Structure formats: structure tokens, C-alpha cells
Amino acid sequence: MLSNLENTIRGTRGNLLEQIPAEKVIRPKGFYKSIAIDFLTVASAFYFGYSANNFLQTGGVVALSFGVFPLLLFSSLEVILTKSLLRRVFVLVLETIAILSFFLNEQIFYLAVAGGIFLVFSLWGEILSRSEILNCIEVRFLKSTFPLLNKTMTALAFIVIIFYLPHWDSKNIFISKPAFGGIFTFSTGFIHDFYPEINFNSSVNDLAKQITIYNLTGTHPYEDLPAPAQKTLLNEILSQTQEQLRKFLGSNLSGEETLRDVSYDLVLKSLVNWREQFGGWFIAAWLAVLFLIARSFGAIIIWLSALVSFLVYQLLMALNFIAIRGESTTKETVKFV
């Protein structure tokens, strides 16, 4: 009798337990989307590290510029979409590791300084942007993300300069020949758009000939001369132009050297002389100049990145990947009574 009662109680208890639904793990909305944004942000930091290392070795200015764009883009999306500051700090640490992974052959001191500067400036910009977001009723994308973009660009400029320092040696004191070549080609590309008749990557003699022809073509005294007289005048002015270039670039030139190589030797010689004359003061000034140049280019990249980020932000809303929701909040204030 007692055993039957015990079996009945056990059966009833089992049925009641079966009726209780199992607790389900419910992911918050956008859980996997936020992970995707975090992954792309870290991947963009990894790509910047590759671009910066490539720039220091080969002088790829364009590649370095394109390496900055994705990191700024995804960082601006992170500050808008990631609500948890702790999670954002964790992502920043991963970004730092991704960037430094391409410079593991450098000394620990340089790695620590570069990583510390990136974390401090990135976190600084993150706090400023979050403060801007909290103080705005509406989502103002550009105004909210600009503090972060500015601080991040400053950090990236410092990183390139810090890892530029260990590459100094007796023959390559201030800037490597590949890096100078990349900057020279990038700069002369703009000038070539205004003077397509002149190839600034040619030899000194060819450059002198192109400049001479450019100056004479279209002038009435030259065009009115017969062909033999034109050739004679061209050769005379060409000799004068070549002589002027040799005096400016160096008297020991054969004329077959490229303008890029001659310009590099001229700049390097001047920098070495200034370093011997002014010592450590010149090195400090040279680093300051490099930083200002990097930030000047960075200002252009910031505006372009902000524009592209805003377009991507609008596209994500159009695709219903993200959405704006209104929230009512109550805040405490302190005032005089």
C-alpha cells in the first residue's frame, strides 16, 4: 500500500517537472551583427599594420592611405553601435595586438610605446565621442564621430613615426630610398596632371629636354623659324637648361640619373649636414615636421573617411541592418535652492 503511494507521488512529480519548459538562452537583438562589426574592426587594424610595415619598407604612400580608411570607418561605426565601453576597450586591445603583430622584430620599448599611445589616444577619442552622443537628443553621426577619428589618426601617425626611428643608420638616416621614392612619385603625380608633357620620373637630360620643348612650343619667335634654325635654338637652350640643372642638383651628374634618385641624394645630403650642425635639436625638429606632414595628410583622410562612414551608416539603415529608436530617459540635476 505504501509502495503504491510512493510510486504515485513520484509519477506525479515527474509529470510536473516535464510540464516546466526548459529555459532558453535568448540572444539580444543584433548579437551576431555586433560580433561581425568587431571582427571587421580588428581586421582593419590588422590591415593597417600591414600597410604601415609595407610603407616603412617600400614607401607605399597610397597603400598606407588606403590602410587607414577601413580602420577609421569601422571605428566610427563602433562608437555609434557599441554601447558597452568595456567591450569597446576589449576590441581596442585586440586592435593594438593586430597592428603590433607586424612589428614583432622591433625592440620591446618601441612596441610598448606604440601600443600605449594607440590605446590612450583611441580611448580618449572614444570617451569624447561617447560624451557627444550622450549629450545629443538626436543621432548626429558626423559630429559624434569626429573626436574619435581625430584622436585615432593622431595615434596612427605616432605609430608610423615610432617604428620609423629604428630604421635609421649611417646610409639611411632620415628616410629610406624606397619611402622617398614612393612619396616623390605620389607628389609628382599631381604635378604631372597640370604638366602632362613633362615626365618627372625620367633622367635629368630627358627632363631638361622636355622642359625646353615645353617652354618653346607655341611661342611665335620659335614657331616662325625654319626647321634647321628651330633645331639649333633648341640645342642651345637645352644645353643651358642642362647646365642649370647640374648646378642646382650637383655638378658631378652625368645626366643619366633619374630625377628621383638625384633628389633623394640632394635631400639626404642636406639633412645629414643639418644633423651634424644642430645635433639632437635637428632630430627633434625633423620628427616634428614628419608628424605635421602626417597629420596634414591625415586631415584629408579624416574628412574622406567621415564622408564614406556616413554613407555606409545610411546604407546600413536602408538595408535594415541597423535602426534608430527613440528612448525616454530621466536625468538627475543639481541646482541652487
Image: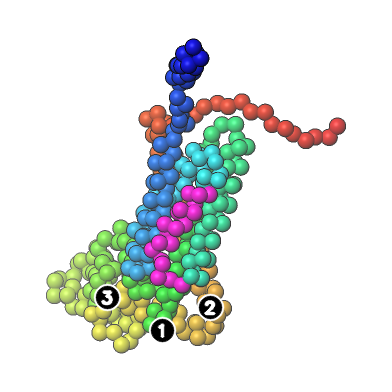
Provide the major secondary structure of the magenta segment: helix
Q: Give the residue drawn at x 43%, y 62%.
A: 100
**Mark 3 — residue?**
258
Query: In the image as oriented, which residue stretches furthest toward the right?
Result: 337
Q: Are marks 2 and 1 in contact (CB under 8 Å)?
A: no
Mark 3 or mark 2: name the one nearer the start of the chain.
Answer: 3
> Is 7 above or below relative to 54?
above
Coloration of the structure image: rainbow
Question: The magenta stretch spans which residues?
Answer: 89-107
Residue under label 2: 282
Pick whichever, 119 or 210, lies toward us. Answer: 119
The residue type indicated by label 1 comes to Ser
Q: Which residue lies furthest to the top in this view?
A: 1
On screen, 204 above or below 118?
Answer: below
Which residue is drawn at the image coordinates 47% and 84% (left, top)?
Answer: 273
Badge 3 amino acid: Thr
**Judging from the image, what secondary structure is the residue with disc 2 in?**
helix
Give residue 66's position: percent from left, percent from top: 36, 54
Q: The disc labelled 2 sits on which kind of residue? A: Phe
Picture coordinates of residue 130, whole percent (x, y):
58, 42
Q: Distance between the residues labelled 2 and 1?
A: 16 Å
Q: Which of marks 3 and 2 is in front?
A: 2
Mark 1 or 3: the one toward you: 1
Does label 1 or label 3 sit earlier along the sequence?
A: 1
- Pointer 1 residue: 170
**Picture layout, residue 293 above or below residue 14:** below
Name the residue at the front extreme: 1
* Residue 26 horizontal/vertical position (percent): 46, 29
- Residue at horizontal 43%, vertical 44%? 38
Whichever of labels 2 and 1 marks the residue nearer the N terminus, that label is 1
